[in-house]
Amino acid sequence: MRFSGRSTVLLAILAAVLFGPLMARRRLGPLDFWWGMSLAVVALVTLSYLADKSQRSYLLQDWREGVGKKIGLGLLSALLLYGIFWFGNTVSRAVLPSAGKEIEAVYAFRQNATAIRIGLLIVLIIGPGEELFWRGFLQRRCQNRLGHSSGWLPAAGFYALVHVGSRNLMLVLSALVCGLYWGALYARFRSAILVAVSHTLWDLLTFIIFPLA
């Protein structure tokens, strides 16, 4: 499949179609949230690589140039983002009466999945896969079209938008903060590896190691 602006739009729409049921019903067809999320991410990453084969060369170049430093920065950035969310969690519970219930509702996405299954899917598929699609594909395409300094904003906005189906203000705001944060990191360092490490560790900290609810 030859890359075009149309394929970017189509894959963005597909992301909304796949993420919509996950956010609204916490499942994708017969699959629970975590299997459904994993399937959606695999599908989006696979199709994005078919649509734009230059992604492979970008990822190889990313791996060859200072990968150790990128991993280190990814780990530090995840800790910083977790600190931001810890502070935001404390403030929002004090300021917004509904914040506590909405934050607890986010953790209901864990459903009956074991921590081991959630952790493995986050590390092997969800964390790195989301960044390969949202930043490595969608944001990079937006930056190529709209400019490096501003192209990350639409990608971050759309990342938040696909969470609207949850009808959970705290989740949508969290997605917006994460989209802007990882988007800014990708715009600054141009490294999918860095943001994949950051996303994966932040997910583990937030959902398994030190939950905020």
Image: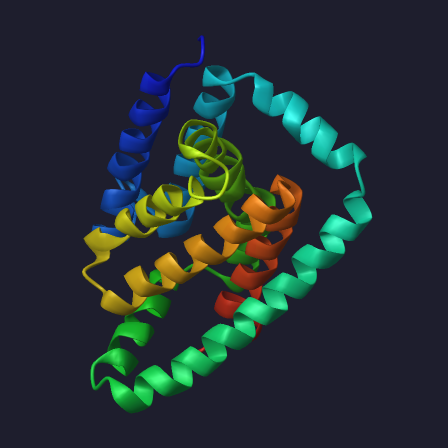
Residue 119 lies in quadrant = bottom right
- Near-viewer residue (146 or 178): 146
Q: Please tell me whether residue 156 is drawn above or below residue 29 in the rendered image.
A: below
Q: Position of residue 81 (x, y in %)?
A: 54, 68
Is 116 left, or right, of 39 in this rendering? Answer: right
Q: Position of residue 53 (x, y in %)?
A: 56, 16
Q: Position of residue 126 (x, y in %)?
A: 50, 46
Q: Position of residue 129 (x, y in %)?
A: 52, 40
Question: What colouring style does the render use?
Answer: rainbow
Is 212 left, or right, of 29 in this rendering? Answer: right
Q: How many marks?
A: 0
Q: Please tell me whether residue 76 is drawn above or below residue 125 in the rendered image.
A: below
Residue drawn at 50 percent across, 68 percent down: 206
Residue drawn at 35 percent across, 43 percent down: 154
Q: Please tell me whether residue 127 is drawn above or below residue 181 in the rendered image.
A: above
Residue 177 lies in quadrant = bottom left
Residue drawn at 54 percent across, 71 percent down: 82
Is 87 left, or right, of 155 in this rendering? Answer: right
